[in-house]
Structure formats: structure tokens, C-alpha cells
């Protein structure tokens, strides 16, 4: 008890965020299976019972973590889309540039979705699929807006672009020295010539 006497008492909301931060670090570094209640509680310097008070159970903690990070990623994607000017290839290139910045700004958030950790619960896969569907819808609508004379199959083209974009962002995340922003955007500009507009 004396060891904890000098600690500042945290609000329940701050403690919840701290626990989620600790769990996130473990999941990103070692996977979901390494994020045991004992390990999380020790790293957060809290009693295990607090985990259950805050989240109900370990799956509840994982759901809260996944939802928090999905929300952060969704906000960054929405900001990238809102801030992108132009049409067609120029717009998509602007979104990609903003997303590269998002990966740089919050690598652990994006690592959770671009490099799936081992032992992910079903809720993770459901959130990932929902997030991918949002991106798919955006790309399909953007491409369809260019007209059939420029993009004959917006849905298929969007799927290919989404897979390529995911690969580009993974490359940036995993090897930023090689996957420089300049290199990635130059590649995107060359590839975008297939989508004028």
C-alpha cells in the first residue's frame, strides 16, 4: 500500500484509457494472446479486479480497444477525405498523401488494422470488415463519379485500389526508410494516370 501512496489518483475515465493504452501496446508488440489480465494489470499497475470493473471481462476490454482504435482511424480517414481537393486521380492522390501522414502520426493505431495481430477476437475481424467497407464505398463512389467513359467498372477498380493502398500504407508502416513519402506518392502519381479526371 505504501508503494502506491505517492501516486496521483486517476479518474475512472483516465484509468480506463491508461488500461487501454497498456493493452494496446502489448497487442501491437506481441498479439492479443499476450494481453492476459495479469499482464495488463501488472503493466498498468492496477489490480486485476479493476479490469473486470471497467470492461466486464477480457473480451470486453478487447472490444473497447478495437472500437477506440477503429474510431481514431475512422476520424483520420474522414479528415483525409474532407481535406482532399480535386477530382479523380488528384483527389485519390491527396487522400493517399493524407493517409500516409495519418500512419506516421498514429502508427500503433494503424498497425492494429494494417498488420493484424495474432489471436485477434471475432470482434476485431468484424470491425476490420466494417472499416474496409467504408473505404470501399468511398472509392467506388469517387470512381463512379468520373463516369463510365473513364472507369468502366468502379467496384472492381475500387477493390484493386483499396488493396494497393493498403499495401502502400503497410509498406510505409513497416519500412519507413525505404517507403518514403516521396517514393510512395511518385508511384501513386504514375499509377493514377490510368484514372484521369
Image (cartoon, helix red, strand yellow):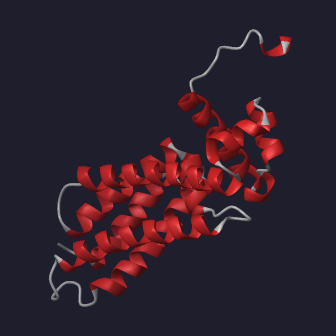
Q: Residue at x 56, y 24 (%)?
A: 11
Foreground pick, 75 / 42: 42
Q: Residue at x 70, y 44 (%)?
A: 52
Q: Position of residue 7 (x, y in %)?
A: 71, 14
Foreground pick, 195 / 131: 131
Q: Quadrant of residue 134?
A: bottom left
Q: In screen coordinates, is 68 left or right of 4?
A: left
Instruction: Indicate the quadrant containing the C terminus: top left, top right, bottom left or bottom right.
Output: bottom left
Q: Is residue 51 above or below residue 176?
A: above
Q: In screen coordinates, is 58 left or right of 181?
A: right
Q: Position of residue 100 (x, y in %)?
A: 44, 52
Q: Position of residue 25 (x, y in %)?
A: 69, 44
Q: Position of residue 193 (x, y in %)?
A: 28, 74
Instruction: Indicate the quadrant containing the N terminus: top left, top right, bottom left or bottom right.
Output: top right
Q: Residue at x 40, y 80 (%)?
A: 159
Foreground pick, 128 / 182: 128
Q: Residue at x 59, y 56 (%)?
A: 63
For the image, the number of numbered tags is 0
Q: In screen coordinates, is 22 left or right of 189?
A: right
Amino acid at each position: 500500500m505504501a508503494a502506491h501512496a505517492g501516486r496521483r489518483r486517476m479518474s475512472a475515465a483516465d484509468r480506463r484509457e491508461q488500461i487501454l493504452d497498456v493493452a494496446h501496446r502489448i497487442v501491437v508488440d506481441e498479439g492479443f494472446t499476450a494481453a492476459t489480465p495479469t499482464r495488463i494489470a501488472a503493466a498498468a499497475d492496477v489490480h486485476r479486479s479493476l479490469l473486470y470493473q471497467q470492461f466486464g471481462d477480457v473480451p470486453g476490454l478487447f472490444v473497447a480497444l478495437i472500437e477506440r482504435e477503429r474510431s481514431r482511424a475512422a476520424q483520420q480517414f474522414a479528415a483525409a477525405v474532407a481535406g482532399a481537393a480535386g477530382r479523380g486521380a488528384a483527389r485519390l492522390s491527396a487522400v493517399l498523401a493524407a493517409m500516409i501522414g495519418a500512419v506516421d502520426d498514429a502508427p500503433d493505431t494503424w498497425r492494429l488494422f494494417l498488420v493484424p495481430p495474432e489471436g485477434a477476437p471475432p470482434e476485431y475481424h468484424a470491425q476490420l470488415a466494417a472499416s474496409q467497407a467504408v473505404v470501399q464505398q468511398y472509392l467506388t463512389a469517387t470512381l463512379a463519379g468520373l463516369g463510365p467513359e473513364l472507369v468502366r467498372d468502379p467496384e472492381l477498380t475500387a477493390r484493386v485500389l483499396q488493396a494497393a493502398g493498403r499495401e502502400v500504407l503497410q509498406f510505409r508502416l513497416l519500412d519507413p526508410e525505404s517507403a518514403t513519402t516521396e517514393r510512395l506518392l511518385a508511384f501513386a502519381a504514375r499509377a493514377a494516370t490510368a484514372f484521369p479526371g
